[in-house]
Every structure is written in structure tokens, then in C-alpha cells.
Amino acid sequence: MQEKGKLTKVSLLFSGCTYNINVVSFAVALGAIAGNFHATPTQLSQLTNLPALFMIPAVLISAKLAERISKKDILLVAWILFMLGGLITTLAPSIMVLYVARALTGFAIGLISSIPRAMIAQLYPTEIGKLTGFQTSCTAAVSVTCSLLAGFLATISWRHPIYLFYLGIIVFLLILFFIPRVPAEKKEFAEEKKERKPYGARILFTVLSGTLAFMLFVPIQTKLTLIIMQGGFGGSVEAGYARAILTVGSVTGGLVFAALAKKNKKAVLILALGLAAIGYYFVSTTNSLYVLFVSIFFAGLGSLGMTLPWFGSTIAQSVDRSRVTMLLSIFTICNYLSQFLTTYLVAGMEMIAGNSKPTTAIFGTFILIVIFLVGATIVLFIVPKKPAPAATA
């Protein structure tokens, strides 16, 4: 029974890795797709970003479905759709069919996005912080594994990296056999829903703060390859090492967060933002490849590895269980929108600086992280708070 409990947790931790598999496998295949389908740069951009357009409505649909059917069923259906999207991609005879496949992939990712975290809050309310940290590490580990496999598979054919979508068969079986079919929220939390109140200003402030944090951590993911290649640090090999180091930092950060989450959660956020700020500063200023690699590790450790799980777990613990799924869905949608808005944030930084060097965006983000760090310190340790009502366990 204890072993099955562990497998339930493992299944939950890996059940949300569709986003990671999609990003890595499709990014590797993109160059070959351009050649095979004679795709224009605009079409390639559309193929890359089209899933995000379908993720947002799917997140809302997922939250509503969770009120009527078990979250386990949502996960199973979403993984089937995700693998179907991969199948259509590998069989696509034209660019238009690829558009359909990418739309289906995005919809599947959106259905899944908030469900694993909501189930963690529902099944393990006393372990939210620890399991959220582990979840970050697990999904980052999936990214590393897929990166290594996709690079090898791409030497065979552009279609072969997409076969990584079929890793979903393993996850599907884990969900099927080890995740319990908990009742729909409308049935399980009927009494709580009768008495629920609107989200308070404090909760919405936390959601917006988490969204801003997510927005600040996008530039290093989009600019890293350019920093390596335009900064004279090396070519595609060194860029690959840099991305791997960022992911290893994220994995390590998730484990550190899981270990520290229950000790002093306020201090953990300050530590995470401090590490992220140090990493971003040296990434944007160093001329040494080795210092750059160390800085990338700390940037991943503090940002993707610790800060984002901090907000995810804090938001999940801020309301009773009947509202966790919807609140996490709102947070997920805000993150998707902020990812889109990051383009304009970076453009604004480059306009102010008068240049479009990739390090400009990273240094500008460093300044914003420092401001965020100061603000978080004031809010968490200086501004007095009214005692919040305890969430229903």
C-alpha cells in the first residue's frame, strides 16, 4: 500500500510534462520542417506559437470539467489528445495539416496544465510545497532527457524527434493504474462551494506577483542561445551545454525548494530571488565562458527551480480545496499571457538601452528582479498582515 502511494506521487509529478516534451521535440525538428515544407519564417513562428493560442481556452475548459468529472479522466483524455497531435504531426503531408496538429497539441497541454498541481493540493494538502518542488525537478529532468534523445533522433529524420510524444504511453499507464479517481469537485466539495467567498485582494496580488515573476524568467530562456553565439562564447555545441546547465539548475532548485519549503517559506523566496539576481547579473556582464556557465546554473536554480514553485505552492495553499483548480487555472492563463507580453517587455528594454544585444534584455531583467526582491522583502517582512483564514484541509 505504501509502495502504491509512492507511485501515485511519482505519477502526479510526471503527469504534467506535455509542455516540456512539446517544446524540446518540436524545437529540434523545426529547422528540418522549414526545409521539408518550404515554410516561411512567418509560418515557422506560427507553428511554434499556435499551441499557446489553444492552451488558454483549454485551461478554462479543464477547470470547468474538473467540477463535473474526475481529474484523472481529464488527464487520460488530454494525454490521448497530446499523442494524437504527435501522430498527426509525423504523418502530416502539408503545412496546413501541421497547423491542425499544433492546435490539437496546444489544446491537450492546456487541459493538463493546472490539473497535476490541483490534484497535489487535493490529495496531499500537507505536502504541497515539497511535491511542487519535486514536480519542477521532474519536468525539468524530462526536458534534459528529451533534449538528448531529440538531438540523436533528428539525425535520422525530422519526424523522429516528434516520436518523443509517445513517451505519453508510459505516463498514461502510470495515471491509469496509480492515480485514484477522486470525485468531481462539485460532488466532493459541495458544502465548501456553498460558503465560498470571492478571492481576496491578497490572493489576487499573489497571483499577479507570480505572473510577473514568470514573465521575468522568460528572457533567459529565449536569449540564451543568442548570448552564446553572438557573444563569442562558442557555437551550437556550447549553446546546447548552456541550455542543459539551465535545466540542471532548475532541477537542483526544485529539490532545494522541496527541502526548504516547510522551514521558512518567506526566507526561501528571498533566497531564490537573490540567487536569480546574481545569476542574471553575471550572465549579462561576464566575458568568461566558465563564469557564464556557473551564472546560468544559479539563474536556473533561483528562478525556474525555486521562485516559480514558491508561487505555485503558495497559491495552491491560499484557498480551500474547492477553489484550487480554478485559481491555478487563472494563474496558468496569466502565465501564458505574460509569456506573450515578454516580447514587448524585452523590446522596451532594448529601446531604452538603444541596442538589441541579447545581454541587454538580461541586464534589464536583472534590474527588475532586484526591484522585485526589494518589494518582496517589504511585503513579506515589513508590511503587517491580518491573519488569513485557514484553508480547509
Image (cartoon, grey):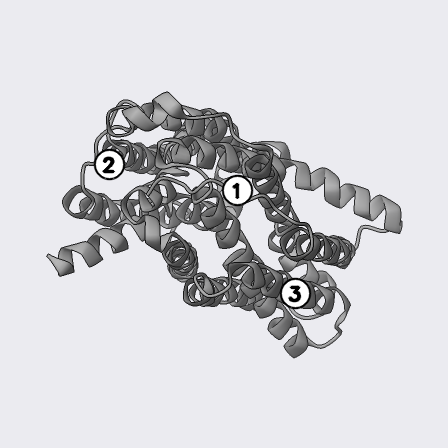
Q: Mark 2 points at which residue?
A: 72
**For this rendering, which residue is in front, 295 or 94?**
295
Residue at the image point whose x is 38% and y is 61% from the top: 145
Residue at 42% over, 33% down: 110
Q: What element carries label 1?
A: helix
Q: How crowded is mark 2: few (under 14 residues within 10 Å), some or many (20 or more)?
A: many
**Are dots 3 and 1 in contact, CB under 8 Å?**
no
When the figure is inspected, residue 216 is found, relative to residue 46, above or below; the finding is: below
Q: Nearer the viewer, mark 3 or mark 2?
A: 3
Q: Is residue 39 visible?
A: no
Mark sitting on residue 274: 3
Q: Nearer the viewer, residue 299 or 356?
A: 299
Q: Say few, some or many: other residues with alpha carbon within 10 Å of mark 3 (under 14 / 14 to 19 / 20 or more).
A: many
Q: Viewer-proximal residue, 58 or 93?
A: 58
Give how far apart the Cα atoms at labels 3 and 1 are. Answer: 43 Å
Q: Residues within 10 Å of mark 1 (few under 14, many from 20)?
A: few
Q: Is residue 274 above or below residue 78?
A: below
